[in-house]
Amino acid sequence: MNLHYKAQMKTIADLINRQTKDITNGLEIPWADPEFSRRILKEHLNQDNDIASRRIKAIDKQVQFLHHQILMAKKTTILDLGCGPGL
């Protein structure tokens, strides 16, 4: 394993293990409400802005960075564990 890859993995581990902040200020988000879920999905799929999810062009740029800079262009699969529809 090269040093660049090890350094990147340490950075990723730091992000995973960091303490999160409560951004809801104690408000309950209605994830189980079908209408709320429909609106959220619509925002995630909207390519006119980056409010919920990044635009496809930005996602492609990030994937290319991961593929070439982190994975050294080795054939692999990326598991998206982020919030959203997995674009």
Image (cartoon, rainbow, N blue to C red):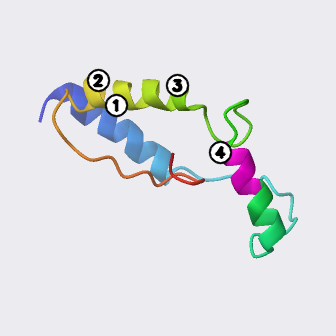
Q: Residue at x 74, y 46 (%)?
A: 43
Find residue 26 and report its horizontal and vertical position in percent. Answer: 86, 65
In which quarter of the view is residue 14 placed? top left
Callout 1: SS: helix
Q: Residue furthest left?
A: 1
Q: CA distance from mark 4 to mark 3?
A: 13 Å
The residue under label 2 is which amino acid type? Gln
- Residue that label 1 marks: 66
Say which of marks 3 and 1 sits in front. 3
Q: Is residue 24 left or right of residue 64?
A: right
The residue that mark 4 highlights is: 45
Q: Is residue 1 visible?
A: yes
Q: CA distance from mark 2 to mark 1?
A: 6 Å
Q: What amino acid is found at the position of numbered circle 3 in the picture? A: Lys
Q: Are marks 2 and 1 in contact (CB under 8 Å)?
A: yes
Q: In this picture, which residue range is highlighted in magenta? A: 40-45
Residue 79: percent from left, percent from top: 36, 52
Q: Residues within 10 Å of mark 1 (few under 14, many from 20)?
A: some
Question: Which badge, 2 or 4, is on the more N-terminal residue?
Answer: 4
- CB under 8 Å between discs 3 and 1: no
Mark closest to the chain's N terminus, 3 or 1: 3
User: Gap in Å between the C-alphas at discs 2 and 4?
Assistant: 27 Å
Disc on res. 69: 2
Q: Quadrant of the N terminus?
A: top left
Q: Which residue is mark 3?
A: 57
Q: Nearer the viewer, residue 10 or 71?
A: 71
Q: Can residue 22 be seen in the rendering of this structure?
A: no
51 or 7: nearer the eye? 51
